[in-house]
Amino acid sequence: MKYERGFTLLELMVAMSIFAMLAVAGWQVFDGVNRARERAQYQADNLALLQYAYLQLQQDMGQIIPYQIPSIENNNNALTSNLNNQTSSAQANNAQTNSAQVSPAEPFMSISAETISFIRFADPDPRYQSSPTIVRVDYVFADQQLIRRQYLSPQGDSINGDFEGISLDSVILKDVSDGRMQAYLPEPSSTFPQDNPNTNNNTDTAATAQNPLLPNGVGMSFTYQDVPITWQFALTEP
């Protein structure tokens, strides 16, 4: 009579232990790959946000225009002067006098430690038949965010606190800390324009040389996701 021999209990326990170790090892490998994929996706999302913010800044900086807001007082004085002139010779003399008294153009950009404000060409809005040709744009570090503010009107100065226009705000970056703006003149400066009591305003050329209309460049430094980042943009003097 022939007896059939099966597995012993010890052999089954050894086999089950081997299968359990293989299953645990496979799960650990799969979990590691999944975590690596999540980290890579997280870094890719952060990089995409940084790229979008940089491209938006680059576009705005590339479309800065020299825009001088006319002074109402100067316009009224010029209009009164023209009405009082009765002869062409008197008008010519008055024009020469007014040209000598014309103040130099104000800088086209304002920079403080946490804000930069400038005028740029406006992108056409297809929702409206006529959209503004120029807009004021501010970049502000506030509440651990980099905020872009776009005003339809270029009037006023948002840095000095005398601007009351309605803005369209958009958050460019979140979780931002230690945000700082800089102007390169070419030496770094935390403010632009700089107060210069020795400025000579007798001629436009001399005033422009001492008080440039635009800095040579703009720098922006901040910490994003515990990573220090510095961006620099070159500007062209008009």
Image: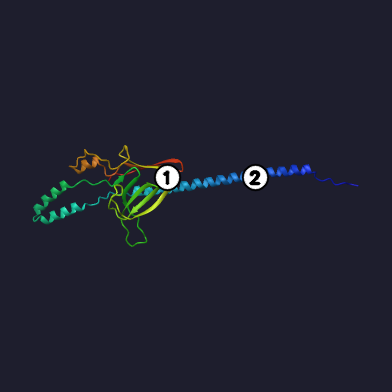
Q: Position of residue 209 (x, y in %)?
A: 24, 40
Where is mark 1, residue-wise?
Answer: 176
Outermost residue toward the bottom in this view: 129
The image's colour scheme reads rainbow
Instruction: Describe the element under mark 1 as helix, strand or loop.
Output: strand
The amino acid sitting under disc 1 is Val
Of circles 2 and 1, the one toward us is 1
Q: Quadrant of residue 230?
A: top left
The label on residue 26 is 2
Q: Residues within 10 Å of mark 2 (few under 14, many from 20)?
A: few
Outermost residue toward the top in this view: 187
Q: Quadrant of residue 36?
A: top right
Q: Position of residue 85 (x, y in %)?
A: 10, 55
Residue at the spot x=9%, y=52% of the render? 90
Q: Position of residue 24 (x, y in %)?
A: 66, 44
Instruction: Describe the element under mark 2 as helix, strand or loop.
Output: helix
Q: Closer to the N terminus: mark 2 or mark 1?
A: 2
The amino acid sitting under disc 2 is Gly
Q: Nearer the viewer, residue 25 or 120?
A: 25
Q: Position of residue 109 (x, y in %)?
A: 30, 46
Q: Nearer the viewer, residue 142 or 183?
A: 142
Q: Residues within 10 Å of mark 1 (few under 14, many from 20)?
A: some
Measure how far apart labels 2 and 1 are at the Cα level: 39 Å
The answer to whether 10 appears left or right of 95 in the picture is right
